[in-house]
Image: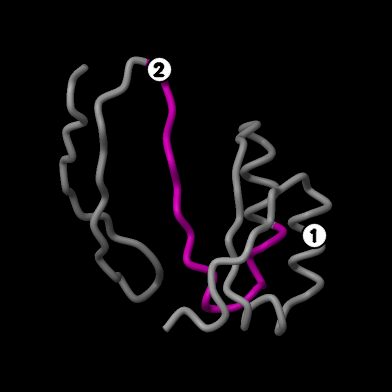
Amino acid sequence: MAAAKLVPAVAQVSAQSRKIPIYSVERKDKAISLSFDAAWGNEDTPTLINILNKYKSTRDVFPVGQWVDKYPESVKQLADAGEDVMNHSSTHP
């Protein structure tokens, strides 16, 4: 069995040009994993759902408890869209 090879890279994201690492592993199938940090608000939740649905992606959502408490309607939108919604932590210390 071959070991996965992690290749760090940097991507430019958000209006603040925050740079974060990206890791990849060699695969034979065409699969990717995306991670979104939803600590900023909920205004993009419907757009994100629509984009992910457009590409027929499967996904799991792990919101932080504080975000769930602040945006319960967005949690419902995610669940209604077929997301598996699970707890990430209470406060993401």
Above or below, 81 relative to 91:
above
* Residue 72 percent coordinates (x, y): 78, 75
Image: 55 above or below 8: above
Q: Amino acid at mark 1?
A: Gln
User: Is residue 31 part of the magenta span, yes or no?
Assistant: yes
Q: CA distance from mark 2 to mark 1?
A: 30 Å
Residue nearer the viewer, 15 or 73: 73
Instruction: Please give the name of the residue rendered at 40% of the width and 17% of the height, measured from the top-left corner.
Output: 29
Badge 1 is on which residue? 77
User: Amino acid under label 2?
Assistant: Asp
**Place of residue 34 in the rendered image (x, y in percent of width and height, measured from the top left):** 45, 47
Q: Which mark is residue 29?
A: 2
Residue 23: % across, % down: 25, 45
Quadrant in the picture for the N terminus: top left
Q: Quadrant of residue 6?
A: top left
Q: Is residue 2 magenta?
A: no
Span of residues in magenta: 29-46
* 28 relative to 38, above or below: above
Q: Residues within 10 Å of mark 2 (few under 14, many from 20)?
A: few
Q: Secondary structure at mark 2?
A: loop
- Main structural element of the magenta stretch: helix, strand or loop? loop
